[in-house]
């Protein structure tokens, strides 16, 4: 079960990455498997590349989404 903060973090993530990418992501697989937010959190960090290069803006965005997701633990 997701808290509102966890849900909000995921909505932000999906809106930026796209539904298809999310649908096939390890993040979603871990979420559906019932893994803890602390286990899932590092998956956000994997999504900070564009054309194989790390994008500083995406690093910041993913850090914010991860923090929101992990702090949303019920």
Image (cartoon, rainbow, N blue to C red):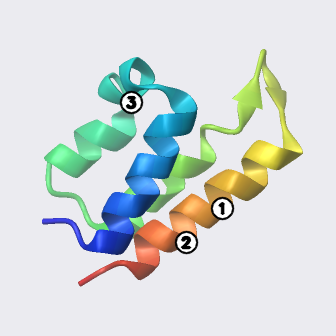
Image position, residue 19 (x, y; %): 38, 25
Screen quadrant of the N terminus: bottom left
Q: Is residue 14 visible?
A: yes
**Residue in front for this viewpoint, 16 or 36:** 16
Distance from Cα at disc 1 to Cα at disc 2? 6 Å
Image position, residue 58 (x, y; %): 74, 44
**Residue in front for this viewpoint, 16 or 70:** 16
Q: Residues within 10 Å of mark 1 (few under 14, many from 20)?
A: some
Q: Is residue 43 visible?
A: no
Please tell me in which quadrant of the rendered image residue 48 appears: top right
Do callouts 1 and 2 mark residues in contact (Cβ within 8 Å)? yes
* Residue located beneath label 1 in the image: 63
Is residue 6 positioned above or below 49 on the image?
A: below
Screen quadrant of the C terminus: bottom left
Q: SS class of the residue under badge 1?
A: helix
Disc sitting over residue 67 in the figure: 2
Residue at screen point 57% across, 36% down: 16
Is residue 2 positioned above or below 44 on the image?
A: below
Disc sitting over residue 22 in the figure: 3
Image position, residue 64 (x, y; %): 63, 65
- Mark 2 or mark 3, which has the lower sequence index? 3
Distance from Cα at disc 2 to Cα at disc 3? 18 Å
- Mark 3 or mark 1, which has the lower sequence index? 3
């Amino acid at each position: 079960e997701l808290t509102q903060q966890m849900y909000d973090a995921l909505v932000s993530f999906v809106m930026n990455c796209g539904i298809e990418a999310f649908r096939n992501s390890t993040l979603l697989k871990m979420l559906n498997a019932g893994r803890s937010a602390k286990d899932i959190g590092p998956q956000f960090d994997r999504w900070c590349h564009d054309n194989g290069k790390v994008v500083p803006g995406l690093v910041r965005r993913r850090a914010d989404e991860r923090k929101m997701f992990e702090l949303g633990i019920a």
